[in-house]
Image (cartoon, helix red, strand yellow):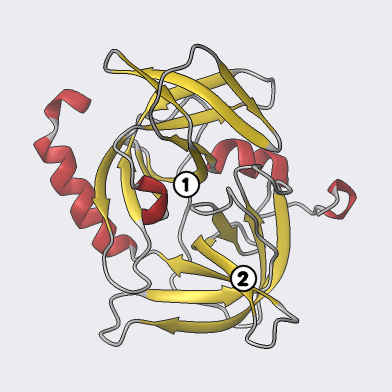
Amino acid sequence: MQQADVQPLGGASLDQLADTRSTVLITGADEVDHLHVSKNDVRGVFRRKGAICRTVGGCAAVPIDTRGYWLTAAHCAASEAALIYAVSSDGVERGVPARIVWRGTGPGADLALLFAPLPEGVLPVDIAPTVRMGAEVICIGSGIASDRFSAGHVVGVGGSTDGSVVWLEHDAPLAAGDSGGPAFYPDGLLAGINFEAGRSFTGDKVRATAIQPNMQQLLVRINEDWASQPNTR
């Protein structure tokens, strides 16, 4: 998506939205001795509980609560070593170890809840209450092997048979590193958390899938975790 095509979203530019409503999520562990994050590649290390961790995976994460709770795709939170890593518009790098609070299970329930204090300037997103068929979506990825922004439209809606999981299908092109990142409607409300990218059955159309978070269910988990973790305050 070219910068010239980017329009303000919900009263903010896409750059502002990306800097304040999403971040890179780095996972993995190994031994090396430097840190480096760039547009098309993520390699490096961070220190967590005295251990040196090397990035062997990169995704994105989205803040949803001022107390320090984030959403990402469950497959992005498969490792216990995780770091919320943000680079502000003025180039300041901020890294905060993330604790995995909950991971979804079952078909299509590719969603995870993390805890990490929100870096300065980062604000939680507001979630749209329903899926908007045909609506435009703007996706923000982690910038790994992809453009930072991509645009498309909602082309389908689905979910689990018991209604506990709702997802939407859209045609914004995604790539490696975009999992866990947000799809926004033009008014700035979160449409969903991207977790899968591919093509139509005929192979001629781009397709991606995002989970629409259920904030009511998430708040139950957040409040329970907050009450059980007094040392995080």
x and y, in percent, of residue 18 in the image? 63, 42
Q: CA distance from mark 1 to mark 2?
A: 22 Å
Q: Is residue 75 above or below residue 109?
A: above
Residue 130 seen in this snapshot: no
Residue holding disc 1: 62
x and y, in percent, of residue 183 in the image? 58, 60
Residue holding disc 2: 198
Residue 77 seen in this snapshot: yes
Asked whether, in this view, residue 146 is left or right of residue 159, the answer is right
State the SS at label 1: strand
Q: Nearer the viewer, mark 1 or mark 2?
A: 2
Number of numbered callouts drawn? 2
Q: Residue at x 75, y 82 (%)?
A: 204
Q: Quadrant of the C terminus?
A: top left
Q: Residue at x 45, y 60 (%)?
A: 127
> Which amino acid lies under the numbered mark 1 shown in the image of this protein?
Val
Q: Is residue 155 above or below residue 81?
A: below
Q: Residue at x 47, y 45 (%)?
A: 61
> Which amino acid lies under the numbered mark 2 shown in the image of this protein?
Gly
Q: Residue at x 45, y 74 (%)?
A: 167
Asked whether, in this view, residue 41 is left or right of residue 83, the answer is right
State the SS at label 2: strand
Sort mark 2 into few (<14), some (14-19) or many (20+) by Cα contacts within 10 Å: some
